Amino acid sequence: MSKNLIARISVALVAIPSILWMSYEGGYWLFGMVCGFSMVGILEFVSAEGHRPRQLRFWPGPLGVAALFYFIATTADQSSRFSFHLGTIFYWSLLAFFLMVGMAYAIGKEPPQELFRQHARQLWGFIYIGALYPFVLSVGGLGESLAIYNVSGGDCLLFLFGLLWVGDTAAMGFGGWLGKHKLAPAVSPNKSVEGFVGGLVGALVVGLIMYFWKFNSIAWYHILIVALGCSVFGQLGDLVESMWKRSVGIKDSSALIPGHGGMLDRFDSLLFAAPFMYFYFSII
């Protein structure tokens, strides 16, 4: 057994129970976890972009994400209020970030093309992390609207994390075993169409398990649609992060998690799957 595999398994044995415990505890345990993931993620992003703490341009992203979560914590202390305020909070945070960072870059000394490029990339990172991570909190708050089905917010997060983790493992297994057709060779040469299908199969298995275990009060086809949708969004979200990493010439967002890479590497699929689950359960 390779050292990398041993490291991956060791981290999983500690991280998975901890994440699920905080998911079921909810409240500020869940908020602290998601906020921590976001802060580490934005630090990885600005560092990979070539900015260092001694530079002024290093700080808008981390400070912007910190301010966003501060506003969430102070105005959305209940799950029912969180969903109501999320759009407003993010809109004003995004507007403030755009204005402040835009004015700062406008007086820079580099050529205008470079200033605009850096401004656009800073804005992309803020949206990627600041807009998507809070949806994990929204999924945790679904327990209130799904209470009539005897489903808790922790159950929703268990479903979300479970189908992504199992789907990712299934995708790797199917890809290594059957992978012949490249899915996105320009972005991620190792990912195959067969692996993508394997991820869908793994997600469907988790969907069936969760239906009979936790979600049997909801029509089975809704649970399978959620499983498939989260898998599709999650796997393509993984490619979005790979696209960004290739644009800056790195393999991993950091070396923070042994055997897994960085925070953005480990939870890239989560950032796209969480909004899908939240909106599907909220609307349908």
Image: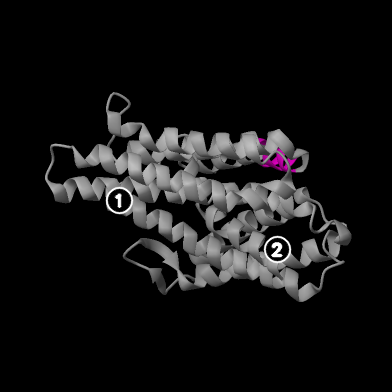
Task: Quickly name the residue at label 2.
Answer: 282
Q: Position of residue 192 (x, y in %)?
A: 45, 69
Residue at (62% x, 54% y) in the render: 165
Q: Is residue 191 magenta?
A: no
Type of amino acid at the residue the image marks with label 1 = Ala
Task: Quickly name the residue at label 1.
Answer: 120
Q: Residues within 10 Å of mark 2 (few under 14, many from 20)?
A: some
Type of amino acid at the residue the image marks with label 2 = Ser
Residue at (31% x, 49% y) in the render: 121
- Image: magenta residue range: 14-23
Q: Main secondary structure of the magenta part?
A: helix
Residue at (85% x, 56% y) in the render: 147
Total number of numbered discs in the rendering = 2
Q: Rounded to the nearest whole Å, what is the CA distance between mark 1 and mark 2?
A: 32 Å
- Under circle 2, the secondary element is helix
Q: Position of residue 30 (x, y in %)?
A: 68, 39
Residue 143 vertical placement versus 8 (above, below): below
Please give left or right for residue 157 compared with residue 104 in the image. right
